[in-house]
Structure formats: structure tokens, C-alpha cells
Amino acid sequence: MSNLGIVFPEKPIKDRVIIAKKFYQNFIDAFIESLKMITASDSFLKKRFTANWSTIEELYETGRSCQIHLGHTFNWEWGNYVLSLNTGYKVLVVYMPIRNVIFEKLFYKLRTRSGSAMLPATNMARAIVPYRNVQYLLGLVADQTPGNSENAYWLNFFGRPTPFVNGPEKGARAGNFPVVYAYIEKRKRGHYHAVVEVATEEPNSLPEGELTRQYVKYLEGVIRKNPDMWLWTHRRWKKEWKEEFINLWIDTLPPPGGNILQELRSKNITTTEL
């Protein structure tokens, strides 16, 4: 409810409660559906999770690897599974290992059953090495809260200073990989459709930070359109903004109390010089 108050301050409490109740239904559905993958056939899941796969396959035909950036929208577990069944790419997914050992083993088995490879976020640089010479699609849930606020991009997210992991953009720019954005709609209970669109085919042509700015704007639109589909229990605003992070600020609008600093930056005067 705290998160809903940040995103929808204009909505009365009763409307936020309605969103919360729909969210919890989606949350429980997604958990049960994830367990359904233990017995579900490929045809069962392909029928119930669709997408405009041609957008990805057109990139595959170019011979280039690519990245897909999405947020915590349900049901990403089915999405990962079905993606590997509908693309020529080797699908690599960066994920945060589950602390519970039993659930980690179960979900790792389910997530890799259709051919996807899981790369732990805690050791991604080493885990991706075996795939350097493979044409791959790297899946990144790019609204993950950074572990280190001092190694992140900071910008406004629903009007509040928020850190975003910089790895997705830096990785795309390092390899000049095409980037696609995606979000998931729930057409009806147990049936999903992913909407995929190309964000850029040449990330190096964009100024640093622009890809992240575009993604955050895109994510805000996705959440406003289908608010009950986003993971509201994710503590997205737990990190506090500090003025010492000013050199990490990439938004076009200044942070709180940042007007003077923004003016200095526009004159090419850095905080280090001060």
C-alpha cells in the first residue's frame, strides 16, 4: 500500500485497495502456475503464453545477439519457458538465486527445462563466459533494486529519486547489442500475452544514460496501464537519495535540492572541482 501511494497519490484509498486485491490474486496465480510447469507440456504452455515472437526473430536473422529488458510483471516464469521454445536464440536469463535451497533447486530445474540458461546475478561476469561465441538473447529484469546505491544510475521513478542497475545499459553499449523491451498482459486467468518492441538496434548511438531513461519511462507506462500485474511487494524505493550521488544522476530533471548542482554541471563545473 505504501508503494501504491507513491505511484498513485491521486487515487483514493479504496481504488488502491482494489489494485492490491487484484495484485494478490495475480501473485498467487503466478506461484501456482509456476508449479504447474512441473507437469505442463510444451504445447500447454505455448497455447497459454503468446507474444509477437516475430519481432525477436527478425533480430535473430541479423546474426546479432540482443538483450530483452522487462519488469516484474506476471507471469515471467512462463514467459522465460515459452521464449526458449519460440526463438533460435540461446536464451540466457540473469536471476537472483532463491535463498531457500529446496526452492532454488526446484525453480532452477523448471527455469532451465526448456533450454534457457540461468546466470546468477551474483556471478554473472563469469557465468556468461561459456556463451561468448554463441548468438544469445540476454533476458534482464531491469527494475531490480541495485545492491549498491553507489554503483547505479539514479533518476526519478514516479517522481521519486530511485536507483536503477546500470548493468543492462552498460552491457548493451559494450557489445552494441540491439535492445528490446517487453511487458506481459493477462488476457484472462491462465492466459498471457507478451508485447515486445525494439528499443534500439544501436545503443552506442545514444548518449550514456538515455537507454535507462527510456526504459524507466516505458516501465512507468506499463505499470499505469496494468497496475495489478506489477510486483508491488518488491521494495523498489528502499534506497534513500543522497546528494553525494549527484554524479550518478542521469535524469533530465534535477533531484531534490539539486538545482544548484545542475546549474554547476551545465557550466562544466564538477563536484570534484568544488
Image (cartoon, helix red, strand yellow):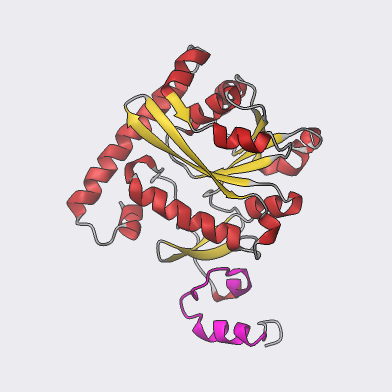
Q: Please determine whether, in this image, residue 219 is positioned above or below residue 116.
A: below
Q: Of 159 and 45, which appears nearest the observer?
A: 45
Q: Quadrant of residue 220?
A: bottom left
Residue name at image x 22 percent, y 44 percent: 18
Q: Of 159 and 69, which appears nearest the observer?
A: 69
Q: Is residue 37 visible?
A: yes
Residue name at image x 58 percent, y 53 percent: 146
Which residues, given as a range, are shown in magenta?
Answer: 245-269
Q: Of 14 and 180, which appears nearest the observer?
A: 180
**Does the magenta segment cover residue 265?**
yes
Q: Is residue 119 left or right of residue 238?
A: right
Q: Quadrant of residue 137?
A: top right
Q: Of 187 and 153, which appears nearest the observer?
A: 187
Q: Quadrant of residue 44?
A: top left
Residue 232 image offset from top left, x and y in percent: 38, 46
Residue name at image x 62 percent, y 57 percent: 148
Q: Please determine whether, in this image, residue 266 is positioned above or below residue 140.
A: below
Residue name at image x 53 percent, y 86 percent: 260
**Does the magenta segment cover residue 229?**
no
